[in-house]
């Protein structure tokens, strides 16, 4: 018998024995963070690839024969510039856009370029756990900012910066998801964005703007990006094609001041992202963006309306409150303060309904403010399953003494 080789004394100090997490889905899966699967334009993406090959096969083949350049495919960067100008109201050149393997990679590169261990970073008091995991991985000390149904409260932000600075803990930068925020679903008004920018300049604090849900609006008015309201370089803009098209494509991007972009890209390992996916995305969206939006936004709205109606029917007299988003994928459920739906999450999942407990989204990971909250994704399940799943969730909360 051959002895198994041991690496026990060889692992790096930063390596973690992190268990693999196989995907698991409840019968009613409101825990996922996916867009509606029936809206994924697979036929259109495949056709766009075919058109690109047929129209200039030598060019496509030549590009595929090399590793992608560091910034990613030029055609998709050019399209991204046009889309940003039309949709988000600011102008950049293709050389100022870097394509990445999803917005997660873009955020990770910027975080590494800006963060030393121990740096204080601000974020909404409830915010996307994927980014807080990256911030902690690179040593950030995350502090949560008070929110209301309109998102970050500018006065609370200013007061917090003043207090932290007085205590010798001046924040390094602000991370925010201003449009259809994950997990609470809020959108910052233009007035609040202007106020937050004024505060950022006052304290010399950059804003890391995560705009990955902006394409998922189905009612109300899209607000201008932070980046569109300020051309000084204080805003780093990150977005993605994942929610608009398909997460499996893994295509995000960012734009920042030239030096910050160079420093961020210095942490990138390997070449640019998948050239094949870039050709498909650019080819499809340049001819189909509006029709694709017109296809999926009514579906999102119907699914959200179904979940909200079922919450009203089954939770209306429970003392619970919930958000009413105008886009995105999520409803934020807040049970009475005496409830602890975080502790029963796994049991409820096994009994048929998945959700992500609010404690997972606490910026400071304190465990103090999220145990009675949950993020519910309405985008993945059907209209019917949204209604049925919320009805079952109410039954399960009652069974576990939380309603």
Image (tube, grey):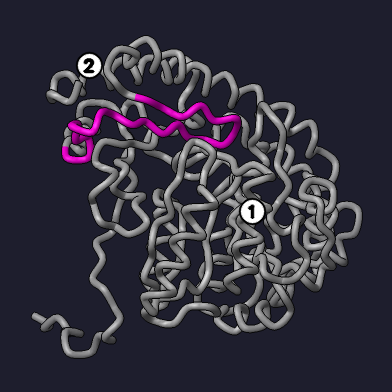
Per the image, the residue denoted by label 1 is 195
Residue 87 is situated, as x and y percent measured from the top left of the image, at 79, 46
User: Closest to the observer: 385 or 7?
Assistant: 385
Q: Which of 173 and 166 is in front in this view?
A: 166
Image spot of residue 58 (x, y percent): 87, 66
Residue 320, quarter of picture:
top left
Q: Which mark is nearer the camera, 2 or 1? A: 1
Residue at 66% of width from left, 72% of height from top? Answer: 272
List the residue tagged with mark 2. Answer: 395
| Apparent side of residue 47 relative to residue 350 in the rendered image (left or right) | right
**Magenta stretch contains residue 79:** no
Disc tally is: 2
Q: Which residue is drawn at 67% across and 45% down?
A: 191
Asked whether the beta carbons under mark 2 and mark 1 sit within 8 Å of each other, the answer is: no
Residue 116, by quadrant, is: bottom left
Check disc 1: other Cα within 10 Å, few if <14, some if 14-19, many if 20+.
some
- State which region is magenta: 321-343
Instruction: Report helix, strand or loop for mark 1.
Output: helix
In the displayed structure image, the side of residue 230 where residue 321 appears, left or right: left
| Above/below status of 16 relative to 211 | below
Residue 305, placed above or below residue 134: above
Q: Quadrant of the C terminus?
A: top left
Q: Which residue lies at the image location 53% right of the left edge and 69% below the top edge?
A: 173
């Amino acid at each position: 018998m051959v002895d198994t080789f041991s690496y026990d004394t060889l692992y790096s100090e930063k390596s973690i024995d992190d268990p693999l997490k196989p995907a698991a889905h409840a019968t009613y899966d409101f825990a996922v963070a996916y867009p509606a699967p029936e809206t994924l334009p697979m036929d259109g993406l495949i056709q766009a690839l075919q058109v690109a090959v047929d129209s200039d096969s030598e060019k496509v083949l030549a590009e595929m024969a090399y590793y992608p350049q560091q910034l990613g495919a030029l055609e998709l960067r050019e399209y991204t510039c046009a889309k940003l100008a039309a949709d988000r109201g600011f102008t950049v050149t293709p050389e100022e856009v870097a394509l990445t393997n999803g917005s997660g990679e873009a955020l990770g590169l910027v975080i590494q370029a800006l963060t030393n261990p121990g740096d204080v970073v601000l974020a909404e008091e409830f915010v996307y756990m994927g980014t807080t995991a990256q911030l902690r991985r690179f040593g950030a000390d995350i502090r949560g900012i008070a929110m209301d149904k309109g998102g970050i409260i500018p006065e609370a932000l200013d007061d917090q910066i003043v207090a932290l600075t007085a205590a010798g803990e001046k924040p390094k930068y602000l991370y925010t998801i201003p449009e259809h925020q994950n997990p609470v679903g809020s959108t910052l008004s233009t007035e609040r964005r202007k106020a937050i920018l004024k505060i950022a300049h006052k304290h010399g604090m950059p804003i890391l703007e995560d705009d990955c849900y902006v394409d998922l609006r189905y009612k109300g008015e899209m607000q201008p990006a932070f980046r569109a309201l300020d051309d000084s370089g204080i805003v780093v803009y990150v977005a993605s094609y994942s929610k608009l098209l398909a997460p499996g494509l893994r295509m995000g991007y960012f734009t920042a001041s030239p030096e910050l972009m160079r420093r961020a890209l210095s942490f990138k390992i390997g070449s640019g992202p998948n050239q094949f996916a870039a050709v498909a995305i650019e080819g499809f969206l340049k001819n189909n963006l509006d029709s694709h939006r017109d296809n999926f936004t009514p579906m999102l709205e119907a699914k959200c309306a179904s979940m909200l109606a079922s919450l009203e029917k089954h939770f209306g007299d429970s003392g619970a409150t919930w958000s009413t988003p105008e886009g995105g994928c999520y409803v934020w459920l807040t049970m009475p303060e005496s409830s602890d739906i975080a502790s029963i999450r796994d049991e409820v999942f096994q009994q048929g309904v998945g959700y992500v407990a609010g404690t997972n989204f606490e910026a400071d990971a304190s465990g103090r403010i999220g145990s009675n909250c949950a993020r519910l994704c309405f985008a993945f399940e059907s209209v019917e399953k949204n209604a049925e799943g919320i009805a079952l969730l109410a039954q399960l909360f009652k069974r576990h003494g939380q309603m």
